[in-house]
Image (spheres, rainbow, N blue to C red):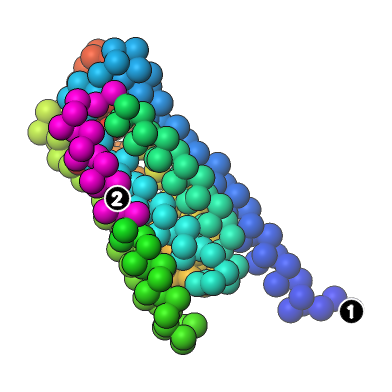
Amino acid sequence: MIDLYSLSVSVATICTDAAGAAGNIFAIGLFVSPIPTFRRIIRNRSTEQFSGLPYIYALLNCLLCTWYGTPLISSHNTMVMTVNSTGALFQLAYIVLYITYAENQKKVMMLGLLSSVLGIFAIVVIGSLHILDADLRRDIVGIISGVSLISMLASPLLIINLVIQTKSVEFMPFYLSLSMFLMSASFSLYGIFNDDIFIYVPNGIGTILGITQLVLYCYYKRAGSESSREPLIESYAETT
């Protein structure tokens, strides 16, 4: 006789793992997207007009989400921990490169911001460890990481506004928008299968924003308004 409960649990586990693995893969697409920017920075030995703020903020978000994914805060969220710890390493590498080639004034600013990010993360970690109630600790860290993730995923709203104003998709690279949509959709499913509101709500919002970007891209691409200028992903990196 087939144990329907065990079967349903197995199917749910497989779906959760599959969604988490897909989210990890698509997230890598987002993490590597600034590489063309830094190739240009290294080639020109200058950060030019590029902003380092997106990498600072992304680092903070990755650190907070990594902490939320650890067994000390939430259970069954290993996929969240692995992808965000990988993302933190990418962002840290970008920040180091940015500081290396930035002007002295920007170096000081970036070092100050990096210290602030590490300080905030340390406060969240130490503060949460002093909360003895495991459920309360999970909720507080979940809210903090969720707000941080929503803010990061909502940053393309600036690009969406720019696309509408200029009627050009030059500043909204297709593969970056596609990667964001696929990553958010995958982790939305992961959160649903894992019954984790702090994962599926922010990623659900990210999915909607990703769809919006793709629809706008197709609309303005069809209208023939795409510019031939080169630094597409670089332009995204400048957005703060």
**Quadrant of res 40:** top left
- Give x and y (percent) for residue 136: 42, 83
Q: Nearer the viewer, residue 96 or 208?
A: 96
Question: Is residue 220 in sight in this rendering?
Answer: no
Seen at 41% across and 75% down, the residue is 128
Q: Which residue is mark 2?
A: 115
Query: Residue 210, can we see it?
Result: yes
Q: Is disc 2 surrounded by few (<14), some (14 to 19) or many (20+) residues within 10 Å?
A: few
Residue 83 pos. (x, y %): 52, 49
Q: Is residue 84 above or below residue 161?
A: below
Disc 2 secondary structure class? helix
- Describe the element under mark 1 as helix, strand or loop: loop
How far across and how far down the image is residue 208, in percent?
33, 52
Q: Are marks 2 and 1 in contact (CB under 8 Å)?
A: no
**In the rendered image, which quarter contains the N terminus?**
bottom right
The residues bearing labels 2 and 1 have C-alpha atoms spaced at a distance of 60 Å
Question: Which residue is situated farthest in the right direction here?
Answer: 1
Boundaries of the magenta span: 101-118
Q: Position of residue 182 (x, y in %)?
A: 46, 44
Residue type at mark 2? Answer: Ser
Does the magenta-highlighted stretch encompass residue 67?
no
For the residue pair 224 and 43, the one nearer the viewer reads as: 43
The C terminus - image quarter = top left
- Residue 8 lies left or right of residue 138; in this view the side is right
Instruction: Judge whether 229 appears above or below 21 on screen.
Output: above
Residue bearing the label numbered 1: 1
* Residue at 54% across, 65% down: 70
What amino acid is at disc 1?
Met
Q: Residue at x 37, y 62 (%)?
A: 122
Is 103 magenta? The answer is yes
Please name which of the two marks, 2 or 1, marks the residue nearer to the observer: 2
